[in-house]
Amino acid sequence: MDKKMVKEMLDGAKEKDYIEIISKMTLQSPNTEKAVIDWCRNNNEKHKNKAVEVELGNLWKEAREIISDFNAYGGGPEWNEDKACDNLWKMDGLVKENNISWDIRSIILDEMLEEFYEGNSGFEDILIEVGESFCKNKEEKRYLADALSKGRGYYGKYAAGLYLQIGDDEQYLKTELGNLEYGSDYVRIAEYFEEKGDRLKASDYIWEGMEKCRGKLDELIDYAAPIYMKERNDAQLQRLYQIAVKTKWDINISAIAKHLYRYARQLKDYEKKKEMLMLILDTCEKGEVKNWFETCKKELTAEDWQKEYENILDKINRKNHKLYLDICMETGREKIVLKDIQNAIHSYDYWDVDYNQYFSSRLAKKYPDEILELYWKDVNELIRVSNNNRYKTAAGLLKHIKGIMRENGQKLQWVSLFEEFKDKNKRKKKFIAMLKGL
C-alpha cells in the first residue's frame, strides 16, 4: 500500500489505534521495528536512550544466535561470522556513544561471557574486547576482571591487566603470579616491580623466568642484558649467556650474542666482538643474515675478513642458501650457482631457488648453452602434467629460450626447434594455444 491508501484506510483512527497497529507490525517485521527505533533516536530526545537499549538488545540477540551455533559446531559459514562481528562492533559503538544503564549492559555482558566460556566459537577475542567497552568505571571493570580471573592463560593475564588499570595491585599480583608461564609473563611482572622501585624483586623474577618459563627466553634476555651492560656486570651477562647456550635454541643464543656484541663494541674488545659476530651468523633468523654479513664486512679487520671469509660463506649457506648464491654471483663464482640450479629439483613456485628465473636469467649471458639445456628440460617436465599454471610457466620459459637464442645468433635454430616442439606436443591444444605470438 502507498501512503495515500494507508491514510484513507486509517481515517478516523485514534493514537491508541496507531500504537496498536505499529506494535503488531514491529513484532512481525524487524524492518518496521528498526524504523521505529531510528525515528525515536533521531526525533524523541526523552526516550532516545530506550531506543538505543532496544537496538543493543536486538543486535546482541541476532549475534548470539550465530555465536551459539558456532560454539555448538566449532564454526560456521563466513557470512554468519561477518554478520556476528558486524553486530558486535555496532554494539561496541552504541555503548561507547550512549549512556546505557549498567543494569542493561550487565545482562548482555553476562550472556556474552556465557558464550565466551563455551570457548568453541572463535569469537572469544572480540567478545572480550567488546565486553570491556561495556565496563565504564572501576567497579564495572572489576566485575569483568573477576569473571576472567577464574581462568588461566591469556585471559587470566587479561584480567590481571584490568586489575592494574583500576589500581588494585593486590589482585593484580595474585592473578599475574598465578599465570606465570612464558618469558613475556615474567618480563611483565619484572616491569611492574621496576616501576615500583623494587629492582631486586624485578631481577629475581627475571632469573626465575630464565630457569622456569616455557618456550623462548629472548624477551627475558632483552630485558635483563641492557641493565647488566649499563652496570658493567660481566658475571650476570655471562650467566645469561650460559643459560641461553644450554637451551641449544638459536633464538635464545642469538638474543644474548647480539647484546654481547654491542657490549664488546662499547668496551672496544675486538676479539669478543668477532666471536659474537660469528655466533650471530650461526644463530640469527634467515631474514637477518644479510645485515649481519654486511656488519662483519665493516667490523672485521681486512686480515680477519680474508681469513674468515670461507667460514662466513659456509654459515650463510646453511642459514640462507639464496643469499649465499647471490653473494657467489656478485663475487665471480657463477659456476657454483650454475651447478646448484642444474642439480636442484625445481618446484616452479616461490620456494624454488630459481623462482622467476632469478639466477638463470643472469647466468644466460655467460652460460647460454647450459641455461638453454636447463630451460628445455624444465619446459618438457612442466608440460608433462596437464595444468594451466604449469603450462603458463612453460610458455614463459619458451619466451626466455627464444630471447637467448636470438641474442646468440640462433634465430633459424629457434624457429626449427620451436616448430618441432609444437608438432611433438600438438595434442596439448590448450598449451599450444598459449604459444601464439612466439
Image (cartoon, grey):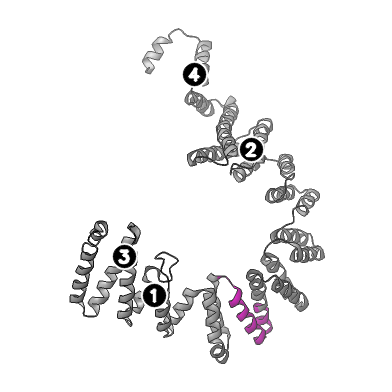
Q: Could you tell me which residue is drawn at 26 percent across and 59 percent down?
A: 428
Residue carrying label 2: 115
Circle 4: residue type: Met
For the residues labelled 3 and 1, the Cα–Cα distance comes to 17 Å
- Of labels 2 and 4, earlier in sequence is 4
Residue carrying label 3: 394
Circle 3: residue type: Ala
Circle 1: residue type: Phe
Mark 3 nearby-residue class (10 Å; few <14, some 14–19, many ≥20):
many
**Helix, strand or loop at disc 1?**
loop
For the residues labelled 1 and 4, the Cα–Cα distance comes to 71 Å
The magenta segment: 261-285
200 or 80, nearer to the observer: 80
- Of labels 3 and 2, earlier in sequence is 2
Q: Is residue 12 left or right of 177 when viewed as pictured?
A: left
390 or 351, nearer to the observer: 390
**Helix, strand or loop at disc 3?**
helix
Q: Is residue 154 left or right of 233 when viewed as pictured?
A: left
* Residue 105, above or below 268: above
In the rendering, at what x and y percent does residue 365 appear?
31, 80
Q: Which mark is residue 359?
A: 1
- Of labels 1 and 4, earlier in sequence is 4
In the rendering, at what x and y percent does residue 381 appear?
34, 66
Secondary structure mainly formed by the magenta segment = helix
